[in-house]
Image: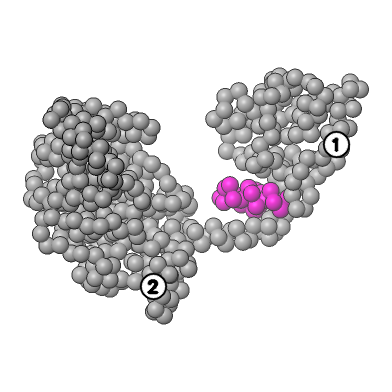
Amino acid sequence: MKDDFVTIPIPDIYLDESIYPRENIDQKRIGIFVENLRDGFKFDPIEVQSCPGQKGRYRILDGVHRWSAYKKAGLTEVYAIVRILNQMDPLLYAAKLAIGPRQLTEAETRNTARRVYENNSRLTSIEIGQAIGRSRQAVDRYIADLRAVTLLALDLKMFHLNQLGIPQDRIAKRLDIPQRTLSDHSAEMPRWAFPLNSDLVKGLTVPQVAEKHGWPEPLVWSLALKGKDDQSRFEALNWNLIPWDVWEFNEDTRFGDQGMDRIPSQVIANILYFFSNQNDLIFDPMSASSMCADTCLALERRCWSLDMKDRPDTKPEIEPYHWNLEGKWEDMPILFSREKPDLIICEPPWFEKNAQGDAKKSISGLSKKEYLGFLEKFFLFLKKKSKKKTRLAFIGRDFQDYENCPAVKEDPDKAILIYDYYKSLQKAGWALTHIIQTPLSSDRFDAEMVEEMQEKRILGTTGRYVLMMV
């Protein structure tokens, strides 16, 4: 911990109630401090921390009553110690400093312990107790219900990742737990499904069971369909199995994240049916949603997924990885493993031309030349790290220069067509075996939008394609 003594303008300091361990502020105490200041009394410096994300702003760790008195007395600045806490929880540190004539009450101590544990469930009862002046047993009582919920959530994540065939070393790393803890819990995994299977046997539907137990619906489907062949699974899920090269499906909200223009889960399901078998390993290297992983659960395929956006609480099955735009992928955690995927399902970020926000870090905002150049290196990398019989399902669409542009005026230099993707795949050594059309519904174009496009002679697209490569 590093100390920095500075004079700070009082308006630059604020009370952050999320790290304040007391239930209220004692106005009588502030009044006494004001009188002390008028009598020339000098207080010890207050302690503050630089406010995360707000340069020049500080939040109070210790000295709320003194700071309030300074403001009430009309002072404009205060002498303070700026603390750098590193990994220590600021609420826990503030609680530790709650000394003097007003110790934390029992209710404040209990509330602080619970808030600290909710912020960081990896803290032990001993660590929390030492900071708030309570025994381990007392802290255990304070947080018993929270700990039970945390362990239940952890068990569910472990079961989820295990069902997708993610190796234990990666599960432990993903959930930030010792591998020994995972091994101890793994022995109990078969029992975790007992209550759900019992409800399914009683006739409860999959959505009802998922809601009752707080499990993701695709994970419950993996239990409900256990032991069934693929065609029986399609029938149970009310999915269409289409044995020709035009797949047109409606949206299915049970699987994957919701979002505009997303590929229906039945497209993924049909890819899995025709080009993989149960227990095969599927790799989803750019998983903007959990569509692939969710569908693999329903069809008993293993699935390893990556995405640049990390969502450890809501999507632990998608491991964080940023495909470096310069092609430096030596740290890629999956394709350097001994086991190689049987099928790769790849739907890269859209070509957006000057994309904003997070897309600046992805390939979306690259120029056409850079975008296709990246994909060629990426497809080559996948080819080199795959088995000889590994297939690749590329899901894409034409990105034409149609936005507010009449069809006759579209600039081909600003467009990327499915043919351009094919050329990049071909240069990387992938051979085309099937072209499957998977158009989206035109219902996404409302009447007003259609009328405007007609008037401006804009030609939109609902076309999607799956290029099967080997």
- The residue under the point 86% across, 24% down is 37
Image-based side of 209 in relation to 90, left or right: left
Position above or below: 117 against 33: below
Position above or below: 114 against 187: above
Q: Which residue is mark 2?
A: 205
Residue 375 appears in view: no
Position above or below: 299 against 346: below
Please tell me which residue lies in front, 16 or 410.
Answer: 410
Residue 252 appears in view: yes
Which secondary structure dominates the residues rendered in magenta?
Answer: helix
Work out how far the residue at label 2 is from the one at label 1, CA to CA, in angstroms: 60 Å
- The residue under the point 76% across, 33% down is 63
- The residue under the point 74% across, 38% down is 97
- The colour scheme used to paint the residues is one colour
Residue 29's disc is 1
Q: How many marks?
A: 2
Which label lies toward us, 2 or 1? 2
Q: Amino acid at mark 1?
A: Arg
